[in-house]
Image (spheres, grey):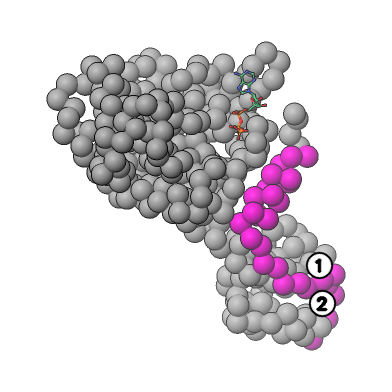
Amino acid sequence: MPECIIEITQLTKTYKAKAAVRNANLSIGKGEIVGLIGQNGAGKSTLLKMICGLIYPTSGEIQLFNEAAGDRPALFERMGQLIERPGLYPNDTAYEHLYALALSRGLKDSRQQMEALLQRVGLAHVRKTKVRHYSMGMKQRLGIALALLGSPDVLILDEPINGLDPQGIVEIRKLILELSQTGLTVIISSHILEELSKIATKYAIIHKGHIVEVISREDLLHSCEERIELEMDDVTTVLPLVEQHLQITDYKVVDLHTLYIYDSTIENYQLSKLLVEHGLTFHSITTHKQSLEQYFLERTQAAGGELND
Ligand SMILES: Nc1ncnc2c1ncn2[C@@H]1O[C@H](COP(=O)(O)OP(=O)(O)OP(=O)(O)O)[C@@H](O)[C@H]1O
């Protein structure tokens, strides 16, 4: 992982008797695009609000840029955020929105920065058009420009793709990728894994307030590749055969009874033939291909049974 700039440890937020986020641990490296995935009510917004200092954690710690944020609230100024919809004034222009925010933050000589931001989010040509004439995607891009005012190191976006049409989604994705290439670290939440699959470099799956899995893009895609699943009493007995006779090294022992083989060059019958020839009995050999959504559902369902509401 690149240099860690955000480290949350055992972070918890409780509202009355209900914990919205429980004992969350997560490390985020500089320049990463982290996708926070969870169903409605999973705790995404609550976690993001704590990371950017909008609400206080009930317990746990947030380290920003290697310092405890609790001791230095000014560190939160390095986090730009767009949580929920941007609060926009229909009768003001994009430029007026940026100008008002720059004034309220006491940013001096911000004119050049505002122009650069309008260019960056593709709104320079409508900088003097009232926001009520903007599409949803344009409003969202203005929200991102507002979040970027003051040149934060981290951009936090809560469901930025929600409600956008396909064109708007493509534009926001492209913008996030361009911003990430400038070294910005991005945390983006969604309840649809597929939507983030084209941009996030790492995923944190949140369910009932718990971060149940953190997985890199490579590992996620690997897990969703086509695989052969072998079920038998003791899969360790078959490993030497698989390696020596079928020359397969890309496999995963899930548990004593389950083996996943990720090698597209072999067929199910070759595996069953090998087992039979060596007098090994098995319960099943099946081919499995999973969509990203199925992966997400499986992880949350597996965790769901063990977690309390
Ligand atoms: N201010 C609050 N007071 C009481 N309960 C809250 C508050 N904010 C959030 N919650 C509860 O905490 C839980 C997590 O909410 P949160 O908004 O973080 O989820 P989410 O994953 O962002 O969901 P959504 O996608 O629906 O916004 C929910 O059960 C919600 O009702």
Q: Position of residue 269 (x, y in %)?
A: 75, 84
User: Image quadrant of residue 44?
Assistant: top right
- Name the residue at 57% across, 16% down: 58
Distance, label 2 to label 1, CA atoms, is 9 Å
| Residues tagged 2 and 1 counted as in contact (Cβ below 8 A) | yes
Residue 216 appears in view: no
Q: Mark 2 points at which residue?
A: 280
Q: Is mark 2 within 8 Å of ligand 1?
A: no
**Where residue 172 appears, x then y in whole percent?**
41, 47
Question: Magenta residues?
Answer: 277-305
- Crowding around mark 2 (Cα neighbors within 10 Å: few <14, some 14 to 19, many 20+) is some
Asked where in the image residue 272 lies, by quadrant, the reply is bottom right
* Residue 232 circle label: 1
Question: Crowding near pointer 1: few (<14 within 10 Å), some, many (20+)?
Answer: some
The reply to whether the residue tagged 1 has its Cβ within 8 angstroms of ligand 1 is: no
Asked if residue 33 lies left or right of residue 15, the reply is: left
Residue 63, above or below 256: above
**Amino acid type, label 1:** Met
Q: Looking at the picture, which amino acid does disc 2 mark? A: Leu
